[in-house]
Amino acid sequence: MRGETREKFGLILGLVGVICFSLTLPSTSIAVEYFGTTIVGLGRTVVAAILVAVVLIVRKEKLPSLRQFKRLLIVAFGAVLGFPLLTSWAMESLPVSHGAVELALLPLATAGFAIFRAGEIPSPKFWISSMVSSLAVILYALHLGFGQLQFADFALLAAVAILGLSYAEGGELAKELGSWQVISWAIMIGAPFFIIPVGLNLTTEMVHAPFHAWISFIYLAVISQFLAYVAWYSGMAMGGIARVSQVQYLQPFLMILFATVFLDEPITIFTLVIAVIVVFSVILGKNAPVSKNGAVSGKN
């Protein structure tokens, strides 16, 4: 596959991943009401591990090397433990429309960590577009919070930071280990440690949870925790971590759209204005040149 075609396909895969991730907060908001933070935050990994184990065994995948295992710990810490647990806790008190905009800081966090973890150096044009988008979503979050951030906001900001590191590490590691293998092994690393806390928080009342709560939890376990990451890490490996990370700026507004459809949360004019600013910044930023090891690629 030619370089330009490979990068475009990487962007498409990244977009597929973002669309799948966009249902994460709405699904979490629904599921956490009936199952609680621990089950939703950690239980999704335990369920996903069953599917992953079957795939790894059937495909007879070889174990990662010790060096790869150490890097997988970073991926597991962010994508398997920190982000699911922190967002589950935050969604107990925040509406999806409030929490979603803060996740738009993920591209900035991912690109920042990419400089150190993957050796990518975005151009000034890239950073300007990132800063404009980030400022827009911060103002939006402050507006929704009546001028102040809540403790749940800080949990989401922490989730953004550790997931940004996880994305950067996983996107680079996917080039040598394989995209779906990265999240698969990260899940297998984390799942054994989650079995006991998940088991202690199971109750008989959960069996009687409504159908939409179970669907939300299954979506989180199968799609958000596994399949979406396959598309996402594949996209970053093919299109470049910093550039593909720009697509994430669409994620909060897709989340708000899904929150309106599934949770009846309103869409305001202010939300639409911010959406236009962010999307315009994405269009400018996604073609910004990105250098790596002295080489520059992309369009000005």
Image (cartoon, rainbow, N blue to C red):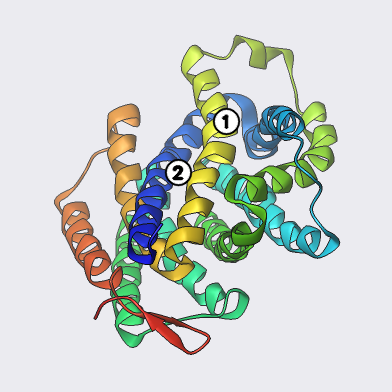
Residue 232 vs 164, above or below: the answer is: above
Rendering coords of residue 61 (x, y %): 75, 41
Q: Residue furthest top?
A: 208
- Say whether marks 1 and 2 touch (CB < 8 Å): no
Q: Which residue is mark 2?
A: 21
Residue 59 in view here: yes
Q: Is residue 190 left or right of residue 181?
A: right
Rendering coords of residue 288 (x, y %): 30, 76
Which quadrant of the view contains residue 205? top right
Rendering coords of residue 286 (x, y %): 30, 68
Secondary structure type for disc 1: helix
Q: Is residue 283 left or right of residue 27?
A: left
Rendering coords of residue 79 (x, y %): 62, 51
Q: Is residue 153 left or right of residue 144?
A: right
Quarter in which the N terminus is drawn:
bottom left
Q: Residue furthest front?
A: 1
Nearer to me, 83 or 90:
83
Residue at x 45% of width, y 46% of height:
94
Whole-angstrom CA distance, mark 1 to mark 2, is: 12 Å
What is the crowding at mark 1: few (fewer than 14 residues within 10 Å), some, or many (at least 20)?
Answer: some
Q: Which residue is mark 1?
A: 222
Q: Which mark is residue 252?
A: none
Residue at x 62% of width, y 75% of height:
117
Residue 145 in view here: no
Residue at x 58% of width, y 50% of height:
179
Residue 184 vs 8, above or below: the answer is: above
What is the crowding at mark 2: few (fewer than 14 residues within 10 Å), some, or many (at least 20)?
Answer: many
Of pointers 1 and 2, the one earlier in the residue sequence: 2
Which quadrant of the view contains residue 158? bottom right
Secondary structure type for disc 2: helix
Q: In the rendered structure, which amino acid carries the disc numbered 1?
A: Val
